Image (cartoon, rainbow, N blue to C red):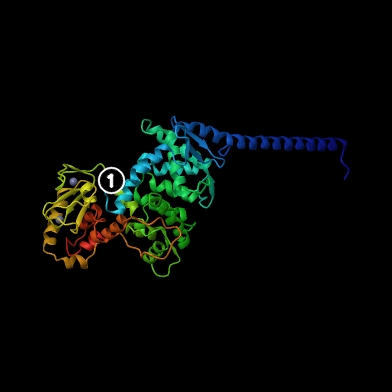
Amino acid sequence: IVLSHFNVNRLEDLNSRQKSLQASCEERLRQLQDALRDFGPNSQHLLAEINLVIAASVDHPWERAVAGNKVPYYINHNTETTHWDHPHMAQMLHSIADPNEVRFSAYRTALKLRTVQKKLCLDLLNMNNAIDALDQHQLRGENDRVIDVSDVLNCLMTMFEGIAEDHHDLVNVPLCVDLVLNWILNVYDSARSGRIRVLSFKVGLIVMCKAHLEDKYRYLFRLIADTNGFADQRKLGLLLHDALLIPKQLGEIASFGGSNIEPSVRSCFEKAGKNRSEIEAAHFLDWMKMEPQSMVWMPVMHRLAAAETAKHQAKCNICKEYPIVGFRYRCLRCFNFDMCQNCFFSGRKAKSHKLTHPMQEYCTATTSGEDVRDFTKMFKNKFRSKRYFKKHPRLGYLPVQTVLEGDPLESPTPSTQHIASQEMHSRLELYANRLAEVEQRQNTSTPDSEDEHHLIAH
Ligand SMILES: [Zn+2]
Ligand SMILES: [Zn+2]
């Protein structure tokens, strides 16, 4: 085909315009890529800027320094020593590691976790805000991905700047961000490789943030479910593993069945039904509501938080505290016998009251109706033999078979205190006896019958 002179000129003109357009596109792309590298979410520039802000998390003689893999460490110029832990973190870990008097491991662990949660201001972090921040930083899905310290820092900055808008006087953003990073690394990267899995990061934040317990369970399950909402044993194992590293970091794991998550996974799948290869959210929720031994610290932490502000119109029969603040324990065998949480946790005895008596736990103030029911129950218990209680053991959690063979992940030998408390668990049988059950019972047609074990078990 022979083109006219006019058309040839036009074609050449179009070609050259297209070429220059392409060139300027490439140039623009290069500029954007450079900008992303220099100023984007993973840029050295931004990281340096964040580190500059967070450097304010320590005061003289401390200095915050950053290792090659972006992991922070702390220099004490007085003692000329370096530390992985922020001085506030070290102080807090020291204070909660004090041999304390709480006999029950689930409560002891919950008390420690609550202290950590408050120190890190994670009790102010709403779960939905946390999820928004994760999404904003492109971490939705992505649970198998490995991220580095700058990703974690970026995300935490967004979360805590959000908290600071609502609680300006309560949060010191650089300090909180630095402490949460410190805690996340202690739990999930104690060797300080500078890399953690997105799943671990999310599990740590969600377990410790502010939300209803059931909402947390749902979100945690979503992290491991496929697009059809199913999770297999391996996925559940990953989730439980990451969750259990949290009490483990506090030296509290022996009482929760050790680091071996296999019995817990099996227990959950067995509860879901025979020969299931996958479970759904409802199965996971049902199992968690039974408070399995490995995870019981989590609901207890929530009850503990709920009990903190509760004032009960009752006097502790031992230390005489009135009103009782925190958990209130009422003996179901002795007449009108109440204990505060300190006396109960430390196992203080009274003349007629024995440590083996069944107890009712309240984390919110009681109504008069409940007092009447407790009285009825107490009255019945008076005439029940020891054998009755032996035959109706009340477990506050769903026990999972403890596996004794060596586990390389197992924490150091537990102290005798922990072993003793393990035994106390089964002896006391009372944890789960919550208001919820009482209310449930109120709504059922069968009035208080021979069903304590049913009432208390989950
Ligand atoms: Zn007391
Ligand atoms: Zn008693």
Q: Residue furthest front?
A: 79
Which of the two residues, 225 or 317, is positioned nearer the viewer here?
Answer: 317
Q: Is residue 247 visible?
A: yes
Above or below residue 286? Residue 1 is above
Image quadrant in which the N terminus is located: top right
**Residue at x-position 36% and y-position 57%:** 254
**Residue at x-position 45% and y-position 48%:** 202
Which of the two residues, 441 or 45, is positioned nearer the viewer here?
Answer: 45
Q: Point out the quarter of the image occupied by ligand 2.
A: bottom left
Above or below residue 320? Residue 433 is below
In the rendered structure, the answer to whether residue 26 lies left or right of residue 296 reads right
Q: Residue furthest bottom?
A: 275
Beta carbon of the mark 1 residue lies under 8 A of ligand 1: no
How many discs appear?
1
Give coordinates of residue 348: x percent, y percent: 19, 51
Above or below residue 68? Residue 225 is below
**Residue at x-position 36% and y-position 46%:** 211
Residue holding disc 1:
306
Give coordinates of residue 64: x percent, y percent: 48, 34
Give coordinates of residue 214: x percent, y percent: 35, 52
Q: Is residue 229 visible?
A: no
In the rendered structure, the answer to whether residue 10 lies left or right of residue 302 reads right
Of helix, strand and loop, which one carries label 1? helix
Mark 1: amino acid:
Ala
Q: Dot 1, how many residues are within 10 Å of its Cα: few (below 14), some (14-19), or many (20+)?
A: some
Image quadrant in which the C terminus is located: bottom left
Give coordinates of residue 70: x percent, y percent: 54, 40
In the rendered structure, the answer to whether residue 27 lies left or right of residue 426 reads right
Which of the two residues, 136 or 198, is positioned nearer the viewer here?
Answer: 198
Which of the two residues, 343 or 275, is positioned nearer the viewer here?
Answer: 343
